[in-house]
Amino acid sequence: MSSTTLLIIIMAIVLAEYLLSEWLSFRNSKSSKLPVPQQLEGLYDAEKYEKQQRYFRVNSRFSFVSSTFSTIVMLLLLSTQLFGELYEYCSSITTHIIAVNIIFFGIILIASDITTLPFQIYETFVIEERFGFNKTTVKTFIGDKIKSLFLTIILGGGLLSLIVWLYTLLGTNFWWAAFCVAISFSLVMSMFYSQLIVPLFNKQTPLPEGELRDEINEFAQRAGFKITNIYVIDGSKRTTKANAYFTGLGKKKRIVLYDTLIEELTTKEVVAVLAHEIGHYKKRHTLQNFFMSGLAMLIQLYILSLTLTNVTMAEAMGASEPVFALSLIAFGILYTPVDLLTGLFMNSVSRRAEYQADDFAAKYGLGEELITSLKKLSVKSLSNLTPDKLYVKFYYSHPTLLQRILAIKKD
Ligand SMILES: [Zn+2]
């Protein structure tokens, strides 16, 4: 195969992925206008539903514009072989291989940050603001940007250096060592995420004594779950949307509730949401997820290692001989179809886990409260009540509201 043919294939994959996602969005837009299913009737009043429909349309249009823009940019970069030229330029600055890679990916990161910034600003300060969700101040927004950039430089730069170094040391055999590095990194991150990363962005405080804490303790005892770490996070600093999540492994595990969640829901409903989170833990979903993504990563790294010395791939990217960074970009795109399939599979596993966690809460007699809390949270975030089936398969990590309600009622 000539490098031109390969370049055409690479660009065709970028285009095909874009067309697929636009087709799915189009189906979802059509579906969003369907009549509300009987079980969900009366969830929104007429005025609120009109607002939900507007919010949906505005978001669809926005994601169409931003994904069209990024696809065009990507196609331009590939067709002009600018990645190859950029790499050549970086190699002219220094011959140190790790430094070349850091500069190369650093420039790409900064350029992509600058081009996507207007979109982020528009989303936060125009769309979310108009619909009353935004709580982010300009100061918080800028602070977040600086902190994330700082984190990317330290963590991303560190990981990249390590992996490039392993590649120079082990050649194409580097994949297993890179896997060990990546898996240890993600293990350390999941252990210390709450203590090291979250505090940079949010304040977490232990749930204070009181009715809620008593009810939670009472439930935990009933469920045979040792609960030590329940934290409240100031999600209201950025958005009015509410959430709860489970994080960490072993002794580091903790349940985090958004302050907005506690504000929106009754005590019983918060306990139901928490029971769902404990359900995830009891059914070992965190561990399951960890192993599955680990396996996906191992396979991906192995296949990557087979392509790193491919000359055609290097030429397609505008280089004369294989270089790690360029092969990585080409591989990333060529791997998209596999990635899509992996995503489909992971989402279906995740949706099944959600049913199991709901089921856990329902088994403890909290089904009704879980349903009312899910309804409240749906209305609060103006979520779409009639998503397209295929769209759900591709993008939803949770079953739809209707699916969840029906499943909980069945118990
Ligand atoms: Zn869940």
Image (cartoon, rainbow, N blue to C red):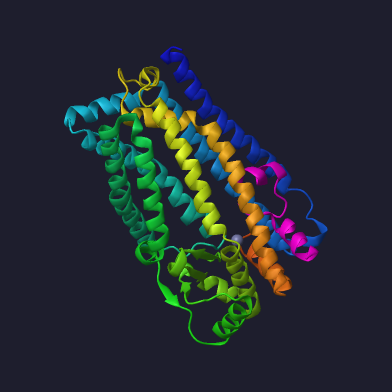
Q: Quadrant of ligand 1?
A: bottom right
| Visible residue check, residue 265 | no
Task: Give the residues drawn in magenta, as a range.
Answer: 384-411
Residue at horizontal 71%, vertical 45%?
Answer: 388
Q: Position of residue 395 (x, y in %)?
A: 61, 46
Q: Is residue 323 left or right of residue 260?
A: left
Check the image and name the residue furthest to the top. Answer: 2
Residue at horizontal 31%, vertical 20%?
Answer: 319
Residue at horizontal 47%, vertical 55%?
Answer: 124
Q: Check residue 76 for magenta coloring.
A: no
Residue at horizontal 34%, vertical 20%?
Answer: 318
Q: Position of residue 215 (x, y in %)?
A: 60, 83
Q: Position of residue 182 (x, y in %)?
A: 38, 46
Q: Main secondary structure of the magenta part?
A: helix
- In terms of image quadrants, where is residue 64? top right
Q: Is residue 334 above or below residue 220?
A: above
- In terms of image quadrants, where is residue 88? top left
Q: Is residue 94 above or below residue 110?
A: above
Q: Position of residue 284 (x, y in %)?
A: 57, 60
Q: Is residue 161 above or below residue 303?
A: below
